[in-house]
Image (cartoon, coloured by chain):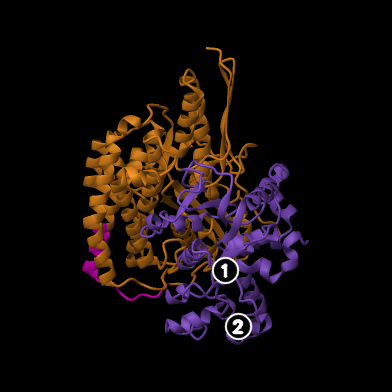
Amino acid sequence: MSQEKKNGKLKVAFFDFTSCEGCQLNKLNFENELLDLLKYVDIVEFREAMDDKAEEYDIAFVEGSISTPSCVQRIYDIRRRSKILVALGQCAVSGGINAMRNEQPLEKVQEEVYGEHKYLFPSMPALPVSAVVKVDYEVRGCPMSAPEYLHVFKSLVLGRKPETKDYAVCVECKLKENECVLEKGMFCLGPITRAGCDAICPSNGQYCTGCRGLVSNVNKNGAVEMLKQHGFSVEEALKRMKMFNTNDLEKEICWGKE
Amino acid sequence: MSRDLSINVHHVTRVEGHGNIVVDVKNGVLKKAELDIVEPPRFFEAMLKGRNFHEVAIITSRICGICCLGHQMTSLRATENALGLEISEQTEILRKILIHGATFQSNVLHALFLATPDFLNVGSVFPLVNTHKDVVLAALRLKRLANDIGDVISGRAIHPISIVPGGFTKLPSESEIKELREKLANEGMKDALFAIDVLASLADQIPQFERETEYISLYNDKEYAFYDGLICSSDVGLVPVEEYEDVTNEFVVPHSTSKHTRFNRSSYMVGAMARFNNSHKLLKPKAQEVAKKLGLIAPCHNPYMITVAQMVEVVHCIEDAIDLMDILLERGIKDEKPNQNPTRFGRGIASTEVPRGILFHDYTYNRKGQIEKANCVIPTGQNLANIDDDMKKLVPEILDEPKEEITKKLEMLVRAYDPCISCSVHMLDVTFEE
C-alpha cells in the first residue's frame, strides 16, 4: 500500500502493546463496514494483518497497556509520528485488566514467574498510554465498543471532534428495560461505570464488571455504601471494582507503589 | 557451500503478538535458528489469586481476544471439575456449537486473511480486495457467520458474556438457532467450499518441507475431539488429562518470554495438523472429501500444510454445528438456570482443543470458592520448540536460495503455526506461597 497521501485519503495505523489484541480483532470483525471504510482511508501500518510500515500517520490507533521499558520507547516514537493518537480499548485507556497485577509488588510477581531469571525480561507496572504520552481521544471498553469505535473513526475522518458519553451504564440499562441487576440479588457496577456499551452484560443476564472505567464524577463512597446495602462487603466491592479499574482507584499506584 | 547468513525479522507480521525470527549461519554451518518471543509478560495466574469462581472465566477470557472462547470454555470446565458442578446436556451441546463457531472463525481468519497473501505474493489481504474480491467477500461472510454464532449463543463473540460456570445466564431462542442453522447449511457451506476451491488452486505455492514430529491433541472415540477427551500422543498413545504436566514438562529458554514444552522428543506439535493426524477418521463426510481434494493425507509431516488442515476443519465444524443444532431443535430449548452450588472445593483440571491446539487450565480453590493456585498451558507455547526444530532442519535445506526467499519461507513457517503470542506469554506457572 502506498505511503503517499492518495486522493486526500488519511493515513491510518494500528499498534498493539500489552493486551489480548481483541480490540484489533474487533476491527476486523466489521465484515460489513471494513471495505467501505477503506474507501476513505489508507491503512499504512497494521502488524497483525499486513507487512507494510510507514513513516507518518494522520491517525494512530493504539491498543494495550505500557508495561515494559521497550513499550515506552515505542509509544514515544509512535506519538512523534502521529497527528492524532487514539487509545483503543480499556488496556490502553486505563491499564484495564493488566493493572490488576499492579496491586502486588512487581519484584515479587516477576520472581514468582521467572524465578532466578527475574531480571531477564524487564517489566514495570501496567500503565495507560496517557501516563506516558498525550492521548487525543479514547474508545473505552473490554472489548472496546464497536459502535463507539466506528463513531470515533468516522468523526475523525470527517474532521469532527467525537462526542463521548459520561453517564452511568444504568441509564442505558433502563432504556433497554432490563430488570435491575442489583434488585435481582446480583452484584453490579452499572451505577458508577461509564455508558457506551448499551448495557450489553446486564442485557445478557450478567452483571456490569465496570470494564469501561468509572464516570468522571464518581461517588466512590456512595457506590460502596449502595453495594453494602445489597449485601456485598466493602472489601468484596472494592475487589470487584479493581478488576478493570485498579489504576483509576489508586492513581498513586501507577509508578510502583510498594 | 560455505555461506554466511544472518536473518533478523523484527516483529513477524500477520501473526498475533510480537515475535522475532533470528537465524545465524557461519561458513555454511547453522549456528542459530529460533523464534524469539518478545511479547511483554501478562502475569494472569497472579491476577487470578483470591478471585471468586464466577469471576475467573471473565478474567481468563482476556488472556487473548482471538482465543477468548477457548479460554473461557476451558476455564469454566476446570472450575466445574474443581467445585463438582454438573452441567446439563443442553449446556454441553450449546458449548460445542460455540467451539465450532470460534474454531472456524479463527481458522478462516488465519488461512484466508493471514496466510493466503503469501501464496499470492502480496503483503496483506488488502490488495486482494481488488484482485480476488470474491474470495475476500466469502471469507468476510464466513467470519460474520461465525461471529453471529458467538453473538447469539454467548452474547458477544469477543469476550463472551452469558457462558458461566454451570450453564448460561441467557439462552438463545429456537428461532435464532434455526436461522443460524439455515445460514450455515446454505451460504456458510457454499462460501467455505468456494474458499477451498481457491486454496486448492494455490496448492503449488505451499512449500514442500517434511519433518516428522510428535503430534499431540485431545482424542475421543465418539467424535473429532474439541470439547472433551484424553490427551493423545502419536508416539505413546493416550494419557489422562489429569496427568498433563507429565506431557507438557514446561521449561524456560532465554530467548522467549513464553516457556517451551517437550514430551517424548525435543519438541512436539499441537493444533489443526496434530488433530487431523490423530483424529482424521472422525471427521464428518464432507470434511473427509475436502481433505482428499486438497491433497491432505494423514499422517502429514509438512507444517506448511497446517493452513490446509484448518480449512478442512472449517467444513467439519460447519457440518457438526448443523447436526448439533438439529438435535437441539428436535429436543426444544429448555429454560435452565446455571448450576452454581459447589458440592466440593479443591483442584480441577480441564483441557479443550482451541484453534491453535490443546489448552490446559488447572485451578485449586479454597473453601470460600476462591482461587488459590492457577496454571494455564497454552498451545502456542507448546508449539514454540517445534517451530525452532523445524527452522533448524529447514534452513540448511534451503541455504542455496536467496536471502529474501529464505526469510519468506521462515516467516511463512512461523505463520503456518498461526501462533498466538499474547496467549503464550499470558504468564508462566506460578505457585502462591503464603
- Amino acid identity at mark 1: Asn
Q: Along the horizontal axis of the image, is A10 left or right of A251?
A: left
Q: Which residue has dot 1 on it?
A: B52
Instruction: Specify the subunit that label 1 lies on.
Output: B
Q: What residue sits right under mark 2 in the picture?
A: A227
Which is more toward the observer, B364 or A21? A21
Residue A231 image point, x, y percent? 59, 84
Count all numbered tags in the image, as a single digit: 2
Q: Give the quadrant of residue B38.
A: top right
Which residue appears at 60% of the width and 71% of the height? A213
Residue numbers of the magenta segment: B322-338
Residue in front for this viewpoint, B184 or B134:
B134
Instruction: Give percent across and percent down for residue B162.
Output: 43, 69
**Residue B324 colored in magenta in the image:** yes
* Residue A215 vertical placement versus B110 (above, below): below
**Colour of the chain lettered A:** purple
